[in-house]
Amino acid sequence: MKDKDFVTKQSLIDKVKGEGRTALTEVESKELLKQARINVVDTRLATSREEAISISRKLGFPVALKIASPDIVHKSDVGGVKLGLRTANQVGKAYDDVIQTISQKYPRARLHGVAVQKMARPGVEVIIGMYKDAQFGPVLMFGLGGIMVEVLKDVSFRIAPLAKRDAAEMLREIKGYPLLEGFRGQEAVDASYLEDMLLKVSDFVGQNPEVKELDLNPVFAYSDGALVVDARVILDEVSEPEDWRKQGEQLRRSEVSTWDHFNSIFYPRSVAVIGASPDFNRLGYHCMSSLVMGRFPGKIYPVHPSLSEIMGFKAYPSIEVAPGEIDLAIIAVRSSLVPALLIECAEKGVKGVVLITAGFKESEDKAGAELQHEVASIANQANIKIIGPNTFGFVNLHANLNASFTPEFSLTPKGGISLVSQSGGFCHLMAPLAMEQHVGMSKIIGIGNRCNVDFADILEYLADDPDTRVIMLYVEGTDNARRLFEVGSSVTKRKPIVAFKAGRFSLSDKASYSHTGSMAGKYEVYTAAFKQAGILIAEGSTELMDIAKALALCPLPKGNRVAALSGQAGPGMIMSDICEENSLVLADFSPQTTKRLDQLLAPLAMRANPVDMGPAWYNSQTIREVIELVLTDENIDGVLLYAAYASANRPLLKEITSLLKSPAYGKPIISCFPSPTGVWVEEKQELVQNGVVIYPTPERAAKAMVGLAKQAYRQAKEYPD
């Protein structure tokens, strides 16, 4: 941007603010955009009937007239727009009509005049918008334009600044994307022009922090360009930095995340339980039981004001008199005692605290929030990291550490998946699910009220944790969403993250002038940020576990070509439908594979993909050869395998066990083996113990394969169709 452009831009903004308004007129908005090299329709302001006619002659007929007022948002709804004016007389009459109509309907509206612009040639109407989220900062939107954005709400979001890939994905995410490709003989749009405009808008909002909201609607998209036909810019009312910037600065100053410090918390040499109790009705009893049942190998120090022994361990009246160094303290006492106890922990040199206690900012009482602020201040000054408050705690299965009030979590299978959850209740849903499905977990962490440790801090630690291969997130909301987005973007380059965001139907409660702000609910913005960061999105708790399990145990496919093998046509079709709905291709087999399938399968069996093998399921050796044949086919990147129990094919699972667990092919094999209760139990347990990925329904198996393919796209930086 040239210096003279900057002066022009700044003087315009100063003029608008000097008049005590935040909304720019269409003419002013387009002037700002034009300086950012965003292609806009030439639009000029007329303050009289004669000036409107003169401008129209200079621009060339036909023209459009629109009321220019910072107080009128939807101009066409109130009679403030006249289109297709082809003569001077029509322009003059239209000017008079617009001014008279608006003056009568809105006598208090500030009228700057009428905007005159040449009629743009028709194109595909799209919208590009931006609004500032208090946590994420600038959020960009793309969708179908005109009134369609309100009717269909077919839009996509991303967090600014955008990369080229983000812009391309925004276009392809909307359901109306086929309209851009050319639908029923219509001319196709060159998507590169729209991608370029999105990137320029991203740069524009980065260079103009005063801009709070932006609507470019409609934008006409052509085969040879893109043109902004209407525009509206809203300035921020305050000059203070946005909340998301303040949060990022505070986090950088506090330097919350240090790997060595967190490692001392998750792999401590010693643990103190403040509030330990022999009374089953006390949380301190269950915290002690968790450590004992988990067979924690380090030192355990119960802290109780009067007892000398609890559960066979010597008890101490305070943490200060406990011998030696203490890495981790679990606090389970009433909230009013916590500040004093934290000071004692600081003097003892404790590195981390699991604050089980409730009664902080989660309560409706203002005193709870104030108490949490006090606790955070003490902890930050002493460099103590707090998991909680109002948490069940955490479990590190690789350290035999159950720092929670749920002893049974020690029975969870050990593996490579770590869960970071805002809700302790969600942890109590997922841990039993992991036990039931024999899913190996590394760490189960309930971060609770997030006193001074939030999602991003745990993610930074898990990124370097050798015992964590895959990370699951359960998110309701966070005070540091921008940091979660930025850290997540970094971590996903090294390890997969799968997230389940609750609160889907909780819409933004912020008043907004723009389409973007009014439609950007918290769920939509969070999931857009997750996608942009490379985080996979699960639609529920079961899908969260299913995708994580597949990522932990399967190689990633090298492409999106899958084969569905089934003993019955119905389940094969179910798997196929889910694959095709999610951009996976039921690929054609190679001629060699097709020829051999003809020889192996019965005449009535379906040989095309999906394969219905029919009677072949009763011959385990034939099935083994079919699977091997498909796995070695160069046209196939992954295999879905369905086999329902039947008495005649009882040897099947034993026959294919070694095949399914073999890494030699480097391709994912995801299986579904439903059976009556008590049948195939030993066979399936053997498969699971050998790392074979099994799901109870064909839908879940197929969705797990979709998750693997999406992760492969993220890593390969390719775009799904």
Image (tube, rainbow, N blue to C red):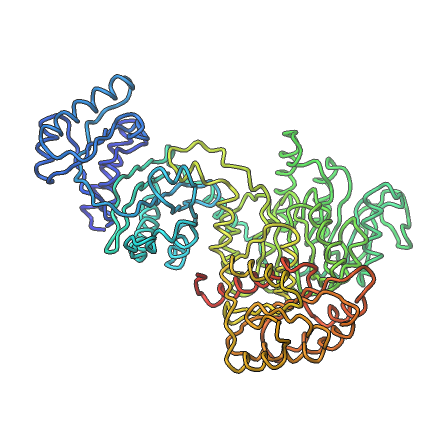
Q: Residue at x 53, y 51 (%)?
A: 484
User: Residue 176, percent across and down?
Assistant: 40, 49
Residue 425 appears left or right of 94 = right
Q: Answer above or below: position of 660 versus 721.
A: below
Count every numbered label the image shows and give the total. 0
Q: Quadrant of residue 461?
A: bottom right
Residue 238 appears left or right of 243 = left
User: Residue 409, percent across and down?
Assistant: 78, 55
Q: Residue at x 23, y 48 (%)?
A: 39
Q: Nearer the viewer, residue 338 or 639?
A: 639
Q: Residue at x 76, y 62 (%)?
A: 675
Q: Answer above or below: position of 714 versus 172.
A: below
Can see residue 259?
Answer: no
Q: Answer above or below: position of 100 versus 153.
A: above
In which quadrant will I find the C terminus? bottom left
Can see residue 426?
Answer: yes
User: Residue 113, percent across and down?
Assistant: 19, 27
Q: Nearer the viewer, residue 151 or 346?
A: 151
